[in-house]
Amino acid sequence: MTIAGKVAIAGIGQTPFGRGLEPSERELACIAIDAALQDAGVDAGQIDALCSYTMEATPDFEIVRNCGFGPLHYFAQVPHGGGAGPAAIGHAAMALATGQAKAAVVWRARKRSAAASRVWAQSAAVLEDHWKWSRPSGLLRPVDEVAVMARRYAHEYGDIAPALAEIAMALRAYACANPAAMMHGKPMDEAAYYAARMVADPLRLFDNCLETDGAVALVLLPVERARDARQKPVVIEAFAQGMIPGHQSMADFHRADALTSCGHVAAQQLWRMTGFTPADVDVAQIYDAFSPLILFSLEAYGFVPKGEAARFICDGGLRSDGALPTNTAGGGLSEAYLHGLNLVTEAVRQIRGTATTQIADARLALVTGCDATPNGALLLRSDG
């Protein structure tokens, strides 16, 4: 039994993206949710399922009260930050496909442009959890931990600096075509990329995601009902999650094969759940809190063999005219960083045919969660 073809994304909504936005996280969530409901043409009183991230600051009952939902028949949260986006949608889809609920909302709201609000700025003086194995060694931030993985990848397969530069430039070019992107109107060339400061060798400033205030939301309906909604339905073809044995979140280098990640586990399950293959994917939205995660995910999901991602990227593979247009609104590096949920809304726009950089005949989209955490993935397709 699968959920393939049974549930569709019927509505998407978002707030403006920026730094220092005035509304609270709760207000941002409600603005994005209301926009998604309007987009779908669904009344708030019809929503009886909610799914979000465990890192979401606004409780579900506050969303119910403020948006006029309910009564609810399903409510759930998914852990692991950047790994949670596709899974939050997948869990809601399973609830609808099994008849547990009839209409669902998934959302993510964040106000993290202020440095003091970031998780690594709030570490305790004494560490008793799994961070005790990395932070006393000076690996204080996620970028430090991903930098270790990037160095190991380069040791195995060769220089990745040109590929990291190309990722940053390709995604910035997409953002410059997207008026909603935080980096809209801010083009970047190779000289600007290399002139930026080193944050955690080999990762420079533009290898790091934005810190964003904003929110996004999606409305899910059973596919037959979605066909009567206001927008063209985007069908959920497959959903999978993955966690590899021996994993440690972000500092994922304590295993014998540190370059085989949770993303590999999710990918194997995803392709088992569908008749599609990587060759069928028209457009990808790959989680990019840090640029090396795109290299890792290209290989995990079978688009290139191990060690070949950098060559694929440098050959223009991520560009709009490349083999796999990727993060076509700018991604976390150049559109907005909302723990990856904005990657899903861009995948929806691509399949609807309404993206700012529209890929011709986009009918199948892959969305991934964070390769460096337990994660998930979605395949979204056109209806019919």
Image (cartoon, rainbow, N blue to C red):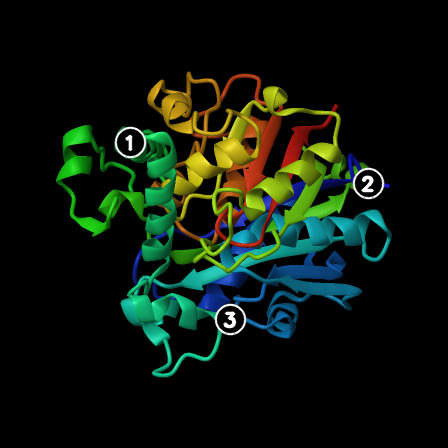
In the rendered structure, which amino acid carries the disc numbered 2? Thr
Mark 1 falls on what kind of element?
loop
Depicted 27 relative to depicted 350: above or below: below
- Between residue 345 and residue 367, name the one nearer to us: 367
User: Which residue is tagged 2?
Assistant: 2
Q: Is residue 105 visible?
A: yes
- Between residue 251 and residue 92, name the one nearer to us: 251
Q: Residue at x 59, y 24 (%)?
A: 281
Report if the CB atoms under discs 1 and 2 are less than 8 Å apart: no
Among the two numbered marks 2 and 3 on one chain, the one whose residue lies closer to the N terminus:
2
Q: Quadrant of the N terminus?
A: top right
User: Which residue is tagged 3?
Assistant: 57
The alpha-carbon separation of the residues under discs 2 and 3 comes to 32 Å
Mark 2 falls on what kind of element?
loop
The x and y percentages for residue 280 are: 62, 20
**Is 231 left or right of 113, judged from the image as shown?**
right
Q: Residue at x 74, y 48 (%)?
A: 93
Task: Determine crowd level at label 2: few under 14, some 14-19, many 20+ residues with C-alpha closer than 10 A.
Answer: few
Q: Residue furthest front?
A: 256
User: Which residue is tagged 1?
Assistant: 159
Q: Quadrant of residue 311?
A: top left
Q: Quadrant of residue 137?
A: bottom left
Depicted 64 relative to depicted 158: above or below: below
Camera-near label (3 vs 1) is 1
Q: Is residue 209 visible?
A: no
**Is 335 left or right of 301, judged from the image as shown?**
left
Q: Which numbered tag is attached to residue 302?
A: none
Depicted 28 relative to depicted 93: above or below: below
Among the two numbered marks 1 and 2 on one chain, the one whose residue lies closer to the N terminus:
2
Mark 3 falls on what kind of element?
loop
